[in-house]
Amino acid sequence: MKVFVDLGWYFKQEKWRYLTGIFILILVSALTLIPPYIIGVVVDGISAQALTQQQLLIWMTVLLAIGVLSYLLRYVWRILIFGASIKLARILRDKLYEHFTLMSGKFYQKKRTGDLMAHATNDIRAIEQTAGAGVLTLVDSLTMGSFVIITMALTISWELTLIALIPMPFMALMTSIYGSMLHKRFSRAQQAFSSLNDKVQESMSGIKVTKAHGYENEEVSSFKSQSNNVVRKNMAVAKVDALFDPTISLVVGMSFFLSIAFGAVYVVNEAITIGQLTSFTVYLGLLIWPMLAFGWFFNIVERGRASNDRVNNILKVPMDVKDSAQAASTVPQGNISFQIDRFSYDETEENLKDIHIELQEGNTLGVAGRTGSGKTTLVKALLRDFDIKDGDIYIGGKSIRSFEKNALLNAVAFVPQDHFLFSATIADNIAFGKPDASYKEIIEAARHAGIHADISRFTEGYETMVGERGVTLSGGQKQRISIARALLLNPQILILDDSLSAVDARTEEFILRNLKKIRQNKTTIITAHRLSAIMHADEIAVLDQGELTEKGTHNDLMHFESWYKTMYEAQQVEMKIEEGHGDE
Ligand SMILES: Nc1ncnc2c1ncn2[C@@H]1O[C@H](COP(=O)(O)OP(=O)(O)OP(=O)(O)O)[C@@H](O)[C@H]1O
């Protein structure tokens, strides 16, 4: 029942829908009581041979009218109550999705994608059921159950009613035991389903690696074992689930047995008429549904509670980065000043330390350093993927924390290392951040990113689909589409995080020349392993284990035995050798 309290906010919000639905539901329950009564009257009429044709016609008309009315009312309550539950599912799904979008990289590193997918599908469905079928079964079992019992007691015989109800407490006991068993088993089944979801997601993403290593068989058997686990856990649920109906049938059967046995004695003793006994057994038949509904109710509510708790736990995860109350909605502009004393992701190591860099608006900053040195971390700090506690980053003299995060992101376009293309056309992929961009703008961005010629070669040009249903692009092509996507935004600050790694030297040079031309008064930050990508930058920063170890222009850094100089010369030799091979 706790889940009903937890969902109270929604019931309040939709109180008219629910109240009207419940009222109609009660009305239908009341209407259902009439036909058994009529049957009793007709049977008595027949046994006394007093039933006229006209009376029979009237009773039949009443029965028909009740049938039609119930049909209509049943339709209305379904729309009202199930409609409300579908709406709740939408609200929760939207809430969850919005929450997902507010979470930072840290959240996604900790949570498994499969789990998150399971929350958005299975858990939401279970909550939807609670707010729909859960409400229905509760109201119906209580009202219909009590109506029938009261009618039996008042209009036929309260003694016979009591006798017929003797097996009922047994059912209440069993359903409550089954309910708690079900809760545990359902939670386990859900966890197994999450893991399976995760497995599928991981297998699909990593299918190329799997195939490249000829690891398919191991993957298939690992999938099978997870899938079997899901089956086992769901079978465990089904085994308890399957106990509900037979238990209820058994209890109802016992009730019928007692009713007929004792009812026959009552009729013989003339305490009730034969028609009343007939009505009584029909009423008893009407009790089956409320009892089933009662069992179902526990079942639904147990699932709903487990799912609601899980969804709430996710919604409770706080945002790593929040806008302060005074945050400005203006887009930041001006010089960038990195004043980072210290930053650590998880306190195990210092990921950034003593980084002080001034970057004039309109200049280009190149960031180099061995792998894991903190280049991505530095640019992500500027994007406020996390907050720097010891130190700050300023744009135009103001802390980036003084702006709304959205405003900050409006100033920046970021091309990540692990670029991502959607299953859409190339044009749509480029225009992702600016859906109303004209074709002319899209083409211009693609030209500057050095990808226009490649796109033009596809038969459908910019309308070519990317991804599973479309063309397979090379790593370099994907990188350049991602760059075009960022260039289209013409951002105040452009960040290329090792985004030129998969293009050849000539294309890299072409793109860099374009950047210089089109971004004259705008700031650009490029991180790279290949130093040719940053050698023309106004300022180059070299990081090592999160620390700023070298800083200056290309010429400055080539003047002493710097890490930069050693790397640059080594890469030049490498390039010459490669070119040599290319000429052969
Ligand atoms: N989300 C995270 N949680 C914990 N540690 C992290 C996280 N992201 C990065 N790190 C750690 O921070 C350090 C710097 O990583 P970062 O990705 O910034 O390096 P990088 O210079 O960009 O490397 P590469 O050139 O390989 O991309 C590494 O030791 C890495 O393991």
Image (spheres, rainbow, N blue to C red):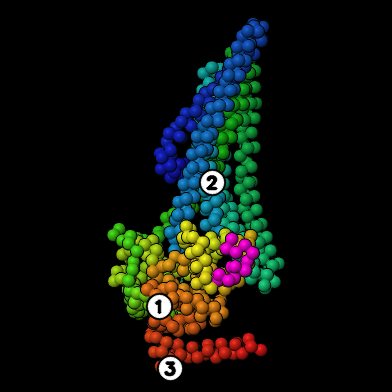
Identified by mark 1, the residue type is Thr
Q: Quickly name the residue at label 1.
A: 364
Q: Is residue 459 left or right of residue 545?
A: right
Q: What is the spatial separation of the Cα atoms under label 1 and label 3, in whole angstroms?
A: 24 Å
Q: Which residues are magenta?
A: 451-463
Q: How far across and down, in percent of the image, does residue 117 sit?
A: 54, 56
Which residue occupies the foreground of this view, 529 or 128?
A: 529
Q: What is the spatial separation of the Cα atoms under label 2 and label 1, in whole angstroms?
A: 53 Å
- Label located before the other in sequence (2 or 1): 2
Confirm whether residue 349 shows in the render.
Answer: no
Q: Main secondary structure of the magenta part?
A: helix
Around disc 1, counting alpha carbons within 10 Å, would you say few (fewer than 14), some (14 to 19), or many (20 or more)?
Answer: many
Identified by mark 2, the residue type is Ala
Identified by mark 3, the residue type is Glu
Using the image, tell me which numbered label, if any, was put on residue 561: 3
Q: Is residue 219 left or right of residue 32?
A: right
Q: How far across and down, in percent of the image, does residue 225 sit?
A: 66, 60
Per the image, label 2 sits on a secondary structure element best described as helix
Q: How far across and down, in percent of the image, does residue 339 sit?
A: 33, 76
- Residue 578 on the magenta segment: no
Residue at horizontal 46 percent and vertical 30 percent from the top: 20
Residue at horizontal 31 percent and vertical 64 percent from the top: 402
